[in-house]
Amino acid sequence: MPKILIIDDDPDIVETMKIILESKNYEVALAKGGEEGLKMTRQSKPDLIILDVMMKSMDEGFDVARALKINKDHKDIPVLMLTAIKEKTGLGFEKDAGDPDWLPVDGYCEKPLKPEELISKIEMLLKKRGV
């Protein structure tokens, strides 16, 4: 059973994702912020990380993503970034996620989440990793 770590400080989003993922037989671990998420990644070695952009700060998720990708033990863990940037600012991701010079993640989903899009992206990223 693939293990997914959700790093997000919004309890409603976290609970929704947990229900969706557990219904698809994923093992789910939760972290309420970037520091806790990095610690849990070191301890539990998840197969995939779902990471929110805006937590304590507007860009905490970007900092966490960079920290994960420069760590030799974690750089191969796919990171799916969640963002409400478009909803909150009207701006979107202009370049493709996965361009390490722009955004060190493997994919992204816009909030509000669509369960079928979330599952589809997770399955694609896990398949690419061979999980």
Image (tube, grey):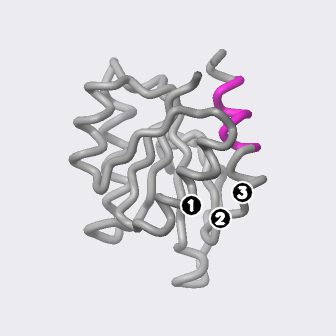
Q: Residue at x 56, y 60 (%)?
A: 16
Q: Assign a secondary structure to mark 3.
A: helix
Q: Residue 110 appears at what percent x and percent y?
A: 63, 65
**Mark 3 crowdedness (10 Å alpha carbons): few <14, some 14-19, many ≥20:** few
Image disc number at residue 113: 2
Label 2 amino acid?
Answer: Leu
Q: Which residue is mark 3?
A: 115
Mark 2 surroundings: few (<14), some (14-19) or many (≥20) residues within 10 A: some
Residue at the (45%, 51%) spot, across then down: 51
Residue type, mark 1 in image: Thr
Closest to the observer: 14 or 65? 14
Mark with earlier residue (3, 1): 1
Q: Quadrant of the C terminus?
A: top right
| Left or right of 25, for residue 31 | left
58, above or below 64, in the image: below
Q: Which mark is residue 16?
A: 1
- Outermost residue, bottom side: 89
**Separation of disc 2 and disc 3 at Cα?**
6 Å
Residue 101 seen in the current view: no
In this picture, which residue range is highlighted in magenta? Answer: 120-127
SS at circle 1: helix
Residue in the image at 68% along x and 51% along y: 118
On the image, which quarter does residue 71 sit in? top left
Residue 84 seen by the camera: yes
